[in-house]
């Protein structure tokens, strides 16, 4: 990621949620083939031992015969965590959101498709989710072992295999009317939008082929 997004022009990370709720949205299509355990998104600070602070979106292994794949969202605070999982059909585009709601003392995480809730956690209470200047990874991450939750990456072919579009990160909860309206429309820079990848860079061969541009106005 652009260094300005990770540390900000004033040395403050735009992507660190701290005491904020957050709303991570993307459009996703999984191929109709087998896949290994992999991460879609991973923003985690490692602490002592197995301690981790941050969040990740992960995909569980599936075979060629499986028509669906399991996708999960985990929020971590030291040795504590909350995780939700659901299944999505392969071969179709899905508008998905991964939401951390800390608007009250009874915090929750969700996975939604537009405004339909696919998975929802029980209530919990975490302190600040302070990832400091940890990187925001797309398509890769590190194995997670916390209590009874274990997600191991294979030694090879451990990166995301699929199609990804319109990644948006907000440090605010969004209204259903706004979610529906912008699910099929472009969105533009504003204060609560921390990251926006449209993945509409030119195709073909040119220098810096692996660059993706942020449209949030923060970099």
Image: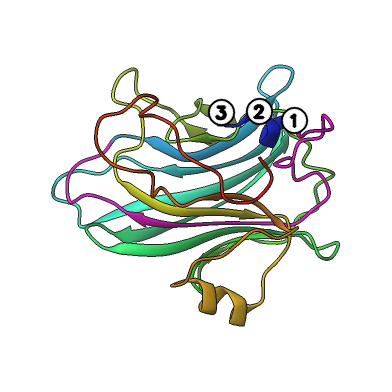
Residue picked out by circle 2: 3
Quarter the C terminus occupies: top right
Main SS, magenta residues? loop
Asked if residue 115 can be seen in this view, the reply is no
Q: Are the residues tagged 2 and 1 within 8 Å (C-beta)?
A: yes
Residue count near mark 2 (Cα–Cα under 10 Å), binned few <14, some 14–19, many ≥20: few
Q: Which residue sits at x=55%, y=44%?
A: 214
Asked if residue 93 can be seen in this view, the reply is yes
**How many labels sit on residues?**
3
What range is drawn magenta here?
Answer: 8-35
Residue 106 lies left or right of residue 65; in this view the side is right
Residue 197 lies left or right of residue 4; in this view the side is left
Q: What element carries label 2?
A: helix
Residue picked out by circle 3: 145
Residue 197 lies left or right of residue 5; in this view the side is left
The answer to which image quadrant residue 75 occupies is top right
Magenta-drawn stretch contains 157: no
Q: What element carries label 1?
A: helix
Q: Which residue sits at x=70%, y=26%?
A: 51
Query: How far from the left and from the top, in percent, is residue 162?
Result: 29, 45
Disc 3 to disc 2, C-alpha distance: 29 Å
Query: How far from the left and from the top, in percent, is residue 183?
Result: 48, 71
């Amino acid at each position: 990621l652009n260094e300005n997004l990770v540390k900000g022009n004033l040395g403050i990370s735009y992507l660190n949620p701290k005491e904020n709720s957050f709303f991570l949205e993307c459009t996703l299509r999984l191929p109709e083939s087998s896949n290994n355990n992999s991460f879609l998104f991973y923003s985690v600070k490692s602490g002592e031992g197995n301690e981790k602070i941050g969040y990740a979106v992960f995909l569980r292994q599936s075979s060629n015969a499986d028509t669906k794949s399991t996708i999960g969202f985990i929020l971590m605070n030291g040795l504590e965590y909350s995780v939700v999982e659901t299944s999505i059909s392969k071969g179709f585009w899905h508008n998905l959101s991964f939401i951390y709601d800390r608007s009250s003392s009874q915090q929750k995480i969700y996975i939604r498709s537009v405004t339909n809730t696919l998975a929802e956690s029980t209530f919990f209470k975490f302190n600040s989710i302070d990832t400091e200047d940890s990187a925001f990874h797309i398509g890769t991450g590190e194995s997670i072992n916390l209590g009874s939750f274990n997600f191991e990456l294979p030694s090879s072919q451990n990166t995301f295999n699929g199609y990804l579009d319109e990644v948006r990160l907000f440090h605010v909860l969004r209204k259903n009317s706004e979610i529906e309206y912008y699910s099929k429309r472009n969105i533009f820079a504003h204060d609560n939008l921390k990251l926006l990848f449209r993945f509409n860079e030119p195709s073909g061969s040119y220098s810096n082929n692996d660059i993706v541009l942020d449209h949030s106005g923060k970099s």
